[in-house]
């Protein structure tokens, strides 16, 4: 007995300093409060707002502070030239359940409504990208869950807010939102979903039926962007200084699960997992010839900015619910990191410059710029003329109507038992 106690004492004496050293190797906040001068409003061509993991909790009458701040940010900018991207995990814990589960369905609809209505009531437009929780938290019935949410968002969004990629298909979906901006959406959970529970192969109703086809398509839409700055969005980051990247609070290192996860076990949703590694390697290959200016994701409940390949910049903006945050560390390539609630704004200027800002939100819904930089666009083609505020006819490649619905959107029925085919990628019509 004494021998065992002595062994545990010795182990603790060794492991505790190691854990403290490991935790102390990385700064828990980086470049907080480092901001640059604001730009004149008349110099702005287009604004992109990036917010993730906003699917919790049940809305209160006052609304969530972060969503309230987002609503105000849309109003403060030009709503018709502002676009919101919800970066996945739009509904915890398992996406939108069937209508027979009355209580949970009611809560789920209220959570989605708050996100959608924040855009509609402010006069903006936006898209919800699927995350792992929208796929029944990766469950075997996830495909049905994500398609059910897709149809609900389409009906509620009235042609101004949609869910893309749609129908559980991997994407990419493309929106040429402005002569300065091409937005490319990927369903990264499709890559991580367990085999047999995602649409793929010869029998798939998706336009792209394999990982190789998705990679080739991403490569093609990046190559054909011309003078537009490219922003690729998905739920899962390709690099992270948060828990999914293998970095934890120091007390957590005293437990066994960080080491197990970092070794790749039980880590389907962590960067070290086998499926996740395949996603990262394939995206790096797709980005190699024409790296996007930004790859944006959520998944981590914090705010991060990286100057790091395979994109020119990578951002993590998964702090879309006030107080729902997790630890973060500054790692290789970090330009900003903070455990805080908020979202990020990307401002595309008429002269071709791009300004990135991180907005931190307090409990009263007040957003404060906590970090900002001009992105390095050296070597990119000059931007196209911004005289026209909308893309040329025919460049809207999804069912989202860039100028709002021409007629009221037709409500879509509930997801049927038999999966419905989706049109080929790049040919989705606008809302009717």
Image (spheres, rainbow, N blue to C red):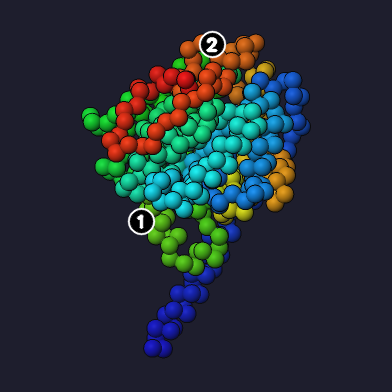
Question: Dividing the picture into quarters, in which one does residue 314 lie?
Answer: top right
Give the left or right position of residue 325, taking residue 153 as reference.
right
Helix, strand or loop at mark 2: loop
- Can you see residue 300? no
Give the left or right position of residue 147, taking residue 294 as reference.
left
Question: Dividing the picture into quarters, in which one does residue 190 lie?
Answer: top left
Circle on res. 392: 2
Location of residue 214 with respect to 62 vertically, above or below: above
Q: Position of residue 225 (x, y in %)?
A: 49, 18
Question: Dividing the picture into quarters, in which one does residue 165 lie?
Answer: top left
Location of residue 186 with respect to 95 vertically, above or below: above
Helix, strand or loop at mark 1: loop
Q: Position of residue 290 (x, y in %)?
A: 47, 23
Give the left or right position of residue 147, taking residue 336 as reference.
left
Residue found at x 68% / y 41%: 69
Q: Position of residue 345 (x, y in %)?
A: 64, 34
Circle on res. 265: 1
Mark 1 or mark 2: whose residue is earlier in sequence = 1
Q: Are marks 1 and 2 in contact (CB under 8 Å)?
A: no
Residue found at x 59% / y 15%: 390
Residue found at x 62% / y 54%: 323
- Can you see residue 162? yes
Give the class, few, some or many, for how many residues have Cα within 10 Å of label 2's Cα (few <14, many ≥20): few
């Amino acid at each position: 007995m004494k021998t065992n106690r002595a062994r545990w004492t010795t182990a603790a004496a060794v492991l505790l300093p190691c854990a403290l050293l490991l935790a102390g190797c990385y700064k828990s906040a980086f470049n907080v409060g480092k901001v640059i001068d604001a730009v004149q409003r008349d110099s702005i061509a287009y604004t992109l707002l990036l917010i993730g993991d906003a699917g919790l909790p049940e809305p209160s009458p006052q609304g969530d502070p972060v969503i309230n701040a987002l609503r105000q940010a849309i109003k403060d900018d030009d709503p018709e030239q502002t676009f919101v991207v919800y970066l996945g995990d739009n509904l915890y814990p398992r996406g939108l359940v069937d209508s027979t589960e009355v209580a949970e369905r009611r809560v789920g609809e209220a959570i989605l409504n708050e996100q959608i209505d924040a855009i509609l009531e402010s006069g903006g437009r936006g898209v919800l990208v699927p995350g792992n929780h929208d796929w029944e938290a990766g469950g075997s019935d996830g495909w049905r869950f994500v398609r059910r949410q897709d149809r609900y968002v389409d009906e509620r969004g009235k042609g101004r807010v949609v869910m893309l990629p749609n129908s559980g298909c991997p994407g990419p979906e493309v929106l040429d939102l402005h002569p300065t901006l091409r937005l490319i959406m990927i369903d990264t959970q499709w890559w991580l979903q367990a085999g047999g529970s995602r649409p793929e192969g010869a029998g798939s109703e998706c336009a792209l039926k394999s990982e190789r086809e998705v990679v080739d398509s991403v490569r093609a839409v990046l190559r054909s962007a011309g003078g537009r700055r490219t922003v690729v969005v998905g739920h899962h980051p390709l690099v992270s200084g948060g828990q999914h990247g293998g970095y934890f609070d120091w007390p957590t290192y005293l437990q066994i699960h960080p080491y197990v996860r970092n070794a790749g076990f039980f880590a389907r949703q962590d960067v070290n997992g086998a499926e996740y590694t395949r996603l990262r390697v394939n995206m790096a290959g797709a980005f190699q010839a024409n790296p996007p200016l930004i790859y944006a994701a959520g998944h981590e409940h914090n705010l991060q900015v990286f100057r790091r390949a395979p994109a020119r910049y990578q951002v993590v903006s998964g702090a879309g619910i006030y107080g729902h945050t997790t630890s973060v560390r500054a790692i290789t390539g970090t330009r900003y990191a903070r455990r805080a609630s908020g979202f990020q704004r990307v401002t595309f200027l008429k002269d071709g410059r791009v300004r990135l800002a991180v907005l931190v939100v307090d409990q009263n819904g007040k957003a404060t710029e906590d970090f900002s930089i001009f992105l390095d666009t050296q070597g990119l083609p000059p931007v196209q003329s911004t005289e026209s505020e909308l893309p040329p006819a025919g460049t809207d490649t999804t069912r989202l109507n860039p100028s709002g619905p021409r007629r009221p959107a037709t409500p879509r029925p509930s997801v049927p038992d038999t999966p419905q085919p989706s049109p080929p990628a790049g040919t989705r019509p606008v809302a009717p």
